[in-house]
Image: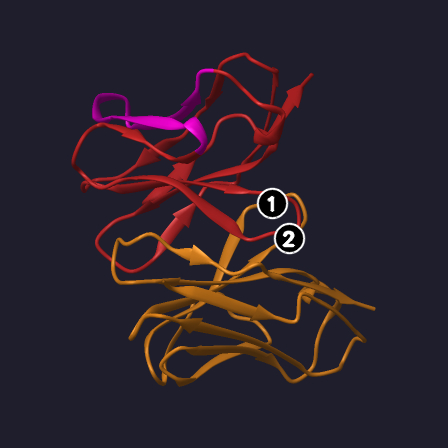
Chain colours: A orange, B red
Amino acid sequence: SQTIHQWPATLVQPVGSPLSLECTVEGTSNPNLYWYRQAAGRGLQLLFYSVGIGQISSEVPQNLSASRPQDRQFILSSKKLLLSDSGFYLCAWSAGNNQPQHFGDGTRLSIL
Amino acid sequence: AQSVTQLGSHVSVSEGALVLLRCNYSSSVPPYLFWYVQYPNQGLQLLLKYTSAATLVKGINGFEAEFKKSETSFHLTKPSAHMSDAAEYFCAVSYTGNQFYFGTGTSLTVIP
């Protein structure tokens, strides 16, 4: 069966520090991969999605970036975090277009 | 624009009462529709999906949803609420691409 792993579960970072969140999927190949941010009490905001290695689409201009160095690995990064980057970050995968998305357990990021 | 609207950001029901969470979509093409549940500090879990087969879709945990094209709705129901149903619920829609559009969520409270 397919599984998705996301880490770390929680992270506290100072303003201006770098960020790297990692997401890996097991049990499937060539998945669509997604990064979302969920602000407190709000819905999901799509940040990036990828349909293949090295293919990244950005939905919202920001100081975050994403990379897909391997088929089942999706990384969310920042060179300098802002206070507004605080939130709950979720990684998801799907088998293709219009297929259900399956989510990781999320990373709670707090910026001090 | 393609979107999904969840009416009611907070719904409270008594234990054993009917649960009804509303979702309406706007689309010029046939949609794929999904309901997800999110427990505190966790990722989203797929409850059910509509993919143009039967209009009444049964999901996990006793939930079901009915696709009504004439009303552009996909409301989520459960005949009898349990305490364990207390969570955040998200409706999502997908069309011909690889993106999902999520509603802003409905927080369900179950009163003992």
Badge 2: few (under 14), some or many (20 or more) residues near its Cα, within 10 Å? some
**Which residue sits at x=65%, y=43%?**
A41
- Separation of residues labelled 1 and 2 (CA atoms): 5 Å
Could you say whether the residue bearing mark 2 is in a helix, strand or loop? Answer: loop
Q: Nearer the viewer, residue A1 or B96?
A: A1
Report the span colored magenta: B61-79
Could you say whether the residue bearing mark 1 is in a helix, strand or loop? Answer: loop
Q: Is residue B76 magenta?
A: yes
Q: Nearer the viewer, residue A84 or A3?
A: A3
Q: Quadrant of residue A15?
A: bottom right
Which residue has dot 1 on it?
A42
Looking at the rendered image, the quarter that the C terminus of chain A falls into is bottom right
What's the amino acid at mark 1? Answer: Arg
Which residue has dot 2 on it?
A39
Mark 1 touches mark 2? (CB < 8 Å)? yes
What's the amino acid at mark 2? Answer: Ala
Q: Is residue A103 left or right of residue A84?
A: left
Looking at the rendered image, the quarter that the N terminus of chain A falls into is bottom left
Q: Are marks 1 and 2 on the same chain?
A: yes
Q: Residue furthest front?
A: A1
Q: Position of residue B106 (x, y in %)?
A: 55, 33
Q: Quadrant of residue A97?
A: bottom left
Q: Position of residue B57 (x, y in %)?
A: 28, 30
Q: Position of residue A32 (x, y in %)?
A: 33, 68
Chain letter belonging to callout 1: A
Q: Is residue B84 left or right of residue B22?
A: right
